[in-house]
Amino acid sequence: MQPEKYSCRLFTCLSERGLAGISGAAGSVLVAAAMVLVAFQQVSAQEPTAGRVSLIIDEVEIASFSELVEISSTTHHVNRLTGFRLVQPQVECTAVLRRGVTTDDELWAWYQSVVGGVGGPLGKNAAIAILDRAGTPIVRFNLENAWPSQIEIGGFDAAGSTAIVTETVTLTCERITRAAP
């Protein structure tokens, strides 16, 4: 939308509310604020709305989540002494996902194999896909050599609460990259 169309729409809107006669600094601030609101509505109407989060391993969805709490990649520098001083980056990568508790125990079994150190390679190449309400991928994050490092169950109150019991899964990995959906 062109700026002159914004000002025409704003003037019409302000006139309808009896505010068109405001001038000076107050009028400029009012018009600027209204322009920001109109621009924000234009942009936010075009942004896709996330519907769910999918955890994918070997291109197969193994779990669906209602919430992506965070994806985090933090770099620390570690001094290593090997005959000479070398500063080497150390990266910590995690992804935290949340959903209502389900009867599916695939993630729990994977976590148990990590804790017990059994069952072949514990880290798996995974992906987190954020899907819109129609199920179309919006964005995808690839997790290299990921494993569940923490599972939390919470939200239950035996005193008659109707809250949904939630499962929060923390995946730790060696590297996170953003990929095309």
Image (cartoon, rainbow, N blue to C red):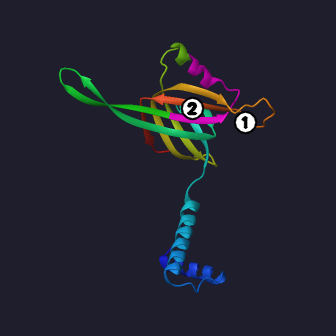
Q: Residue at x 50, y 42 (%)?
A: 140
Horizontally, residue 69 falls left or right of residue 180, namely: right
Disc 1 residue type (three-letter): Ile
On the image, the x and y values in percent for residue 89 come to: 32, 32
CA separation in Å, label 2 and label 1? 27 Å
**2 or 1: tag closer to the N-terminus:** 2
Tell me where residue 14 appears, x and y as whole percent: 61, 80
Task: Find numbered disc 2 in the image and state the secondary structure of the residue it sits on.
Answer: strand
**Residue, disc 2:** 60
Q: Looking at the image, which residue is at 61% across and 36% down?
A: 98
Q: Which residues are magenta?
A: 95-112
> In the rendered structure, which amino acid carries the disc numbered 2?
Val
**Quick one: SS at disc 1?**
loop
Q: Is residue 152 above or below residue 35?
A: above
Question: Is residue 88 shown in magenta?
Answer: no
Furthest toward the bottom, the residue is 21
Residue at point 53%, 71% (across, down): 33
Q: Nearer the viewer, mark 2 or mark 1?
A: 1
Query: Is residue 98 depicted above or below 108 in this figure?
Result: below
Residue on which the image places disc 1: 164
For image coordinates 57% across by 82% down, the residue present is: 11
